Amino acid sequence: MLHLLERPLEAPKPTRRTFLKLSAGAAGGLVLAMKLPGAAQAAAGDGEFIQPFVHIRPDNTVAVLSKHLDMGQGTANGLGLLVADELDAAHDQMVLEFAPSNPQVYANSMFGVQGTGGSTAMANSFMQYRQAGAAAKAMIIVAAAREWGVPAAEITVSNGVVSHPSGKSASLGDLAGLAAGEEVPAEPVLKTPDQWVYIGKSFPRLDVKNKTFGAPNTYTIDFQRDGLLVAVVARSPRFGGKVKSFDAGEAEKVPGVVKILEIPNGVAVVARSTWPAIKARDLLKVEWDDSGAEMRSSDALLAELREMTAAPGIKVREDGDVDAALESAAKVIEADYDFPFLAHGTMEPLDIVLHFDGETAEFWFGSQIQTIDHNVAANVLGIGFEKVRINTLWAGGSFGRRAQGDAHPVAEVAALAKAMLEAGMDPAPVKVVWTREDDMTGGYYRPMSAHRIRVGLDADNNVTAFKYNIAAKSIMKGTPFESVMMKDGVDHSMTEGVHDTTYAFPLVNMDQAFQETQVPVLWWRSVGHTHTAYVMETMVDRIARETGKDPVAYRLEMIKEDPRKVNVLKLAAEKAGWDTLAPEGRFRGVAVHKSFGSYVAEVAEISFRDDGTVKVEKVTAAVDCGTPVNPDNIRAQVEGGIGYGLGAILRNQVTLTDGIVEETNFDTYEPLRMSDMPEIEVHIVPSTEAPTGIGEPGTPPIGPAVANAVAAARNEWITSLPLAKAGLV
């Protein structure tokens, strides 16, 4: 394998577009200037066809390099099938690997940097990876024609075999080295949908085998390397707290402990394995300086948010004089909503490995935004970007947790590696492990938020005005994303799903206000949609029911200018039997929402247990995410999104007492249980539209669909989550 760098890497310039110009690192494999999206000039290395996205090897394996992190959502598998289809490779010869950190080649075109998030992977890469496969196939055919002395037009490729009517044939691997020398076609011919072999059909995921038998070094948590040390860090129990002093006397006595060092955000225990590191950390005596820490409890933070929604804020949308319209309305519906902090709760907590020898650095971890991670690593270590290499590994979940604007795990392990060298230790790879408790209490939550809604109706029960005020800590403000993702001081990630609603309300006005707190916040699966969809869809349901209209019929009337949303709503309602009576003791609720370019409608059917708690019996979902690349994976993502969202709305919340997080593990932050999981049907709308996101869109509708079913049963509107607070769980 070649390890070359195509062009010199430069430090980012300190401008408002720095986020888009963060530099990248050396590549594992040949990375050359792009001639067209998805296909670069290839080169041979020991008979291998090497291209940025596709490597065809002499052993006849076809490696697809995923530029996106796969954290269980199936992205790498999907990209592999795109290449396989255009290349006409066999399914069983495909292998999946991760691309090196280099945004000059692997940038997400929707971000401007190399990274994964916002359910953009397939939308960003659909054409790019197909072109890469098609270009490779074209070069294979030209090479075969030249080698066999036959017209290229007479050669076919099927299931990984290159053939000519004369009887000549070869595998892709046989021709790899020869094909690498051919010219890359400027515009490779892509298949038409009727020619697709894999796209649009369900095939087993290529990553399942290694994950099933526990292949070594699949995940960072089980990554091993000769001489590897393991570290855990004692961090302040309050956000913003700092080390005042510490006593490591007893901790240093634990067998296996190598060194205990203070680093900028705490005290690190370095040991020969995980257990002695954790045991020694428990014996540390640390005095914390809380002078700059968040000391408030959740009730005080929420009270402040509610006050903020009662006052004018930053104008997000203003269609007209909504206050005058409300003043003259025949009836006004008012509601106040609040949502708690939520943890991501990934199966694999944060972890990261670094080997730094003082001059070069090599990382291994589930890097979600490689460009930011790379930039932070170089800055903290004080070395050139070209001296940093990032090896992306599979990640055991993220839901947004690994996509940090500050790359804090990178900064932490880099600071530790520097401290180890400064303490006279020999250079050695070190793995920083976050325990479940570290991750649960370590912040970076879905923001706590408060919402105030006022809806005006005229004498004929038509909506005349919709006023929406929201307050929360901004995910974007004060981060590298602010300069490029906030305009005129507005954080649209907080209001997505409302400011762009397609409900035909004549006046929609929206204000937002930002809470200042040391509690770190981050995107959580579906970001702003996780709370705005709940507010919008329960309010729409409430309007429909209070005006005597069927909730589905009312929605269809109000979204008739949004045909794709209409289609998914009709499909979900039809498949759920909306127009028929629910079974005795069951009640139905509906919600429909667009997020990340995809449309999802869900009908929840609930019952009540003898103790009055809610049991979600069945969810019928319809989804339009454009061209369905792998229907089975789409269903899996919608099912997972429903389960993830359902667990959150039922009982999940992160609460603070005097600034300290109370929920520390899954005993107090309970995940969804098998007994909670409903029967789920997922119906996919056939489409020829470009693929859109699917990792997140299944999550937003489930909360309001369940809440609307509760309202149908009891005429009780749940506006403060989780449902457990209302005694329903």
Image (cartoon, grey):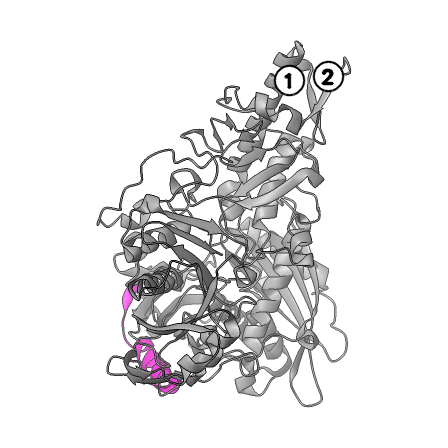
Dot 2 amino acid type:
His
Using the image, tell me which numbered label, if any, was put on residue 164: 2
Task: Answer whether residue 311 is magenta in the image.
Answer: yes
Say if 514 sits above or below 219 in the image: below
Q: CA distance from mark 1 to mark 2?
A: 9 Å
Say if 550 sits above or below 148 in the image: below
Coordinates of residue 286 in the picture (x, y in percent):
34, 84
Q: Residue at x 34, y 43 (%)?
A: 386
**Residue 288, image quadrant:** bottom left
Q: Nearer the viewer, residue 197 or 383?
A: 383
For mark 1, what is the residue? 144
Dot 1 amino acid type:
Ala
Region rendered in magenta: 295-315
Q: Nearer the viewer, residue 560 or 513?
A: 513
Q: Nearer the viewer, residue 357 or 382?
A: 357
Q: Residue at x 29, y 58 (%)?
A: 380
- Asked if the residues shown at circle 1 and circle 2 are in contact, with their CB atoms under 8 angstroms apart, the answer is yes
* Number of residues whose C-alpha sits closer than 10 Å to that of mark 1, classed few (under 14), some (14–19) or many (20 or more): many
Q: Residue at x 27, y 54 (%)?
A: 382
